[in-house]
Amino acid sequence: WKEMADVAKEIGFDAIDLTVRKGGHVAPERAAEDLPQAAGIVRRAGLEMSMITTDISNTRTPHAEAILKTASALGIHHYRWGLLRYTDTGHPAEQLKAFVAPLRELGAMSARYKMHGMYHTHSGINQVGAPQWDLYSLFQEVDSPWLGYNYDIGHATAEGGYGGWLLSARLAAPMMKGVALKDYRWAR
C-alpha cells in the first residue's frame, strides 16, 4: 500500500480508489482489519480516498456489510459495486424484475452506512447497464437515493458510438454519482 501510495503521489494523482475485492488491494474477508491500515497509509501520503471498488452485487455478497461498515467509519462514502448480468435465456425485462428486491435491500444497507453505491456501466454481451435504458429502468423501480451510476464514458461510447452515448448520458445524469473518464480512439 505504501509503495502504491508513494508512486501515485509522485506521478501527480490526488486520490486513490482502492479495490476491496478478490485479487485487489484489500481482500474482502480482511476489510475490517486491512482497510483502515491501507486508508491510513494512503492519507499519510497526502492523497484522498473517498471511494472504493468492490465486487458487491447485493447484500448477500460475502463480507458486503463489513466492507460498507468499515469504509463508512473511515469517512469513505462511495463504492463501486459489482456487475449484474443477463442470462442467455428468458426475457430481459423479466430478468430485470428479479434484481429489484435485492437492490432495494442493497439500497437500505447503503443508507444505513451512508454509502453511495455507484454501478459501473460496462459494454458487452449480457451486461446490465450496457444499453443504459435497462439500468435507468431498474434504478427507477428500486428508487433508492443511495444507488446510482458510475457512468463509464468509454463503455457508453462502445455501446452507442454514433450518438447513443449522448442520450444515455442525459438519461443517467440525474443519477450519476461518479463518472469514469477514459482515453480512447476509434480505429480499424
Image (cartoon, rainbow, N blue to C red):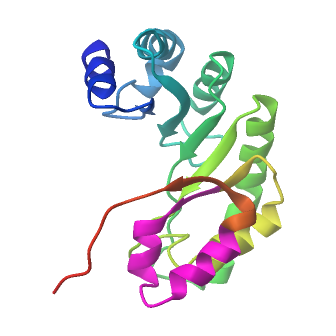
Q: Can you give x and y, in whole percent of width and height, for residue 79 in the image?
A: 58, 39
Q: Quadrant of residue 188?
A: bottom left
**Which residue lies most toward the left here?**
188
Please state if 70 lies on the left or on the right of 14 as rendered: right
Please state if 83 lies on the left or on the right of 118 as rendered: left
Q: Quadrant of residue 26?
A: top left
In this rendering, is residue 51 above or below 162? above
Q: Which residue is nearer to you in this view: 150 or 184?
A: 184
Q: Which residue is nearer to you in this view: 183 or 151?
A: 183
Write the residue at 80% across / 68% down: 140
Quarter of the image for the N terminus: give it. Answer: top left
Q: Can you give x and y, in whole percent of width and height, for residue 55 in the image?
A: 48, 43
**Which residue lies most toward the bottom here?**
162
Write the residue at 44% across / 91% down: 162
Please state if 7 lies on the left or on the right of 131 as rendered: left
Q: Can you give x and y, in whole percent of width and height, for residue 172 in the image?
A: 67, 69
Residue 11 visible at all: yes
Query: What range is drawn magenta here?
Result: 149-172
Would residue 134 be counted in the magenta stretch? no
